[in-house]
Structures are given as structure tokens and as C-alpha cells.
């Protein structure tokens, strides 16, 4: 949902990458009770949905982690105690990782989005280990909506791959497709991109995905790791169990640096009070399915 934080005369100013409140609105919009419920946040939580509320000065979210709104981002120039809390009828949870909104939003110049148009800075989506000659791509959370998106992705990744393979030859690639999506109109174009990179630059490639989406929409295009293959890969000592250390190591091979809280959640088995030392194959499949499905919630509680 998007809208102003308050109503009734609100005026704001933007200057030099910061937001200021010239005149506060008379009407609070974040209230304890409303006359009519058109959308139930409680019901959304029961269905596993996350709800994001974006205003000019703050961003809130609701997830199963908190029974009320969680304040996750604040505009530069805004003070939580002065400009947010006094204008709400209830106290939100303040995120332990409270972020400042990108100051480029509050400037008049170009935002130069090409380098991080896919959710995070492109360089943060790629890591290269020169000794074993392995490159890791993190496509998690990325959405490709148009042919232009595919073309931009191709340009960025080929530039990186050409640099990596020019002196040492084809590289082993590990690709994280967790929560990756692409529109029906560009599925074929994306598959062509991926296959072109494999043909031109890869010695081997392992692709991981958390949802049935990949098997349904990219079937026949790309080879993805099944649950059995994933368990076998993570079970480094081949004892039929996957330890916490093996989970962490396996995820790192997928370019995922799991937090301590996320790892604890993975190793927590229903009906067992404390996290277990190792997971059976059945427990592993269920645990990793939950992690990939709700990774943002797992990592949101990293204590």
C-alpha cells in the first residue's frame, strides 16, 4: 500500500536528498480502529503473505514475526521520535535493522539505476573464488518483466563472465534462483540467455530454486537441483545426515550467507524443544523448503 503518512493539510519539502515536514497533517491514518475493514492484515499473515506500507517518510511491514506493524525504513531527514511515533495511535515495532531510504529518491537528478536495477547492486549479486575458479550468481528475488530487462541482465553478466574466463577459461557456476521470477513473455528469452552463458562460459553449472515455479515454467530449459540432489550435495561426509555446519557450507556454495538466526530456524524440528544437531533427509527437505519459501522472514530474525 502507498500513501501519505497523515492527511488534512500535510505539506513536505525535499532538499539535498532529505525530507522535511513543512506542515503536519491534522488527521492520523495509522489508528487503532477503523469503521470498515477492506483488507485484513491478520488474515494475510495466516495465509503467509507479507504486507508493505510505503509512505513519504516511513516504510512499514507486517509479517508473522510481529503482531503489529514493523518500522523498517525511514526517510533521510526524518526523526522517528518526532515525526513518526507521535502521529500514530499505536506503537510499531522498530526493526533492529532499521534502514534509511535511498537518498536518491529525494533528489532531482538521475538515480543511475542500471547498476542496481535488479534489487541490489549488481556487484553484490556476483562473487568469484579464483582458486577453485568458481563464480556464484545470486538471482534471488529478481524479477524480469521485459525484453529490456533480459538484455540488460545479459550485458551485465557477460561483461563479468568475459573478465573471469579470459585468462583461466570456462568457469564452474553456482546460481541461486530462490524467489526468482520472470513474466511469461520473457521466459524463452531468459532461458536463451542462461543457455548462451552456459555454452560460452561455463565448465559446469548448478542451479538451485525453492519453488515449483521453476519446474513448471522453465522445465526443459534449465536443469535445477531436486530435493534429493540438494541433500546429497549438502551431506558432505555422506553419513545420511546434514549438520548445521553442512547447511551453512552448502548455502555458501549457493552464494547464500545464512544468518545465525536463520540457521537456528532451519535446524529447529517441530516437536523438538531445541534445534537438532543434524537433519535427516525428510527433515532437511521440509526445513530447506521452509527456508527458501520464507527466507526474508527467517533472515529478519537473526538473533
Image: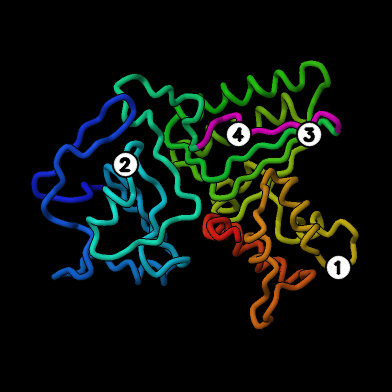
Q: What element carries label 3?
A: strand
Which image quadrant for residue 261? Answer: bottom right
Q: Mark 3 points at which residue?
A: 134
Q: Mark 1 points at which residue?
A: 240
The foreground one among 180 and 55 is 55
The reply, left or right, for residue 148 in relation to residue 284 is: left
Q: Name the residue under label 2.
A: 78
Residue 1 seen in the figure: no
Decide: few, some or many residues near mark 4? Use Cα within 10 Å; few <14, some 14-19, many ≥20.
Answer: few
Which comes before the other along the chain, label 4 or label 1? Answer: 4
Check the image and name the residue furthest to the bottom: 271
Q: Answer whether labels 1 and 2 touch (C-beta < 8 Å).
A: no
Check the image and name the residue furthest to the front: 82
Q: Answer whether labels 1 and 3 touch (C-beta < 8 Å).
A: no
Q: Mark 4 points at which residue?
A: 124
Residue 209 lies, with reference to residue 68, above or below; the image says above
Residue 107: where, in percent of width, then height?
A: 32, 25
The foreground one among 28 and 180 is 28
- Image point 74% across, 22% down: which residue? 164
Residue 51 seen in the figure: yes
Q: How far apart are marks 4 and 2 (CA)?
A: 28 Å
Foreground tag (1 vs 2): 2
- Image point 62% across, 26% down: which residue? 157
- Image point 36% across, 54% down: which residue? 60
Foreground tag (2 vs 3): 2
- Image point 59% across, 64% down: which residue? 290
Amino acid at each position: 500500500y502507498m500513501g501519505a503518512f497523515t492527511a488534512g493539510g500535510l505539506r513536505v519539502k525535499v532538499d539535498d536528498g532529505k525530507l522535511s515536514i513543512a506542515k503536519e497533517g491534522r488527521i492520523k491514518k495509522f489508528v487503532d480502529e477503523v469503521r470498515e475493514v477492506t483488507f485484513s492484515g491478520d488474515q494475510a499473515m495466516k495465509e503467509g503473505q507479507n504486507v508493505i506500507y510505503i509512505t513519504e517518510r516511513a516504510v512499514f511491514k507486517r509479517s508473522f514475526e510481529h503482531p503489529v506493524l514493523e518500522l523498517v525504513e525511514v526517510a533521510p531527514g526524518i526523526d522517528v521520535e518526532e515525526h513518526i511515533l507521535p502521529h500514530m495511535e499505536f506503537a510499531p515495532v522498530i526493526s533492529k535493522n532499521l534502514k534509511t531510504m535511498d537518498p536518491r529518491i529525494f533528489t532531482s537528478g538521475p538515480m543511475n539505476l542500471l547498476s542496481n536495477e535488479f534489487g541490489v547492486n549488481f556487484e553484490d549479486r556476483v562473487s568469484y573464488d579464483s582458486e577453485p575458479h568458481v563464480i556464484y550468481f545470486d538471482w534471488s528475488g529478481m524479477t524480469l518483466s521485459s525484453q529490456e530487462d533480459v538484455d540488460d541482465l545479459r550485458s551485465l553478466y557477460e561483461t563479468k563472465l568475459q573478465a573471469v574466463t579470459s585468462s583461466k577459461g570456462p568457469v564452474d557456476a553456482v546460481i541461486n534462483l530462490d524467489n526468482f521470477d520472470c513474466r511469461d513473455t520473457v521466459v524463452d528469452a531468459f532461458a536463451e540467455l542462461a543457455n548462451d552463458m552456459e555454452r560460452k562460459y561455463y565448465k559446469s553449472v548448478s542451479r538451485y530454486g525453492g519453488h515449483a515455479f521453476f519446474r513448471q515454467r522453465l522445465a526443459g530449459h534449465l536443469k535445477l537441483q531436486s530435493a534429493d540432489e540438494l541433500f546429497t550435495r549438502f551431506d558432505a561426509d555422506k553419513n545420511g545426515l546434514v549438520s548445521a555446519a553442512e547447511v551453512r557450507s552448502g548455502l555458501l556454495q549457493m552464494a547464500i550467507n545464512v544468518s545465525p538466526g536463520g540457521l537456528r530456524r532451519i535446524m529447529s524440528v517441530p516437536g523438538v524443544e531445541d534445534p537438532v544437531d543434524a537433519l535427516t533427509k525428510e527433515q532437511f527437505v521440509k526445513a530447506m523448503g521452509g527456508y527458501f519459501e520464507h527466507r526474508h522472514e527467517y533472515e529478519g530474525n537473526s538473533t
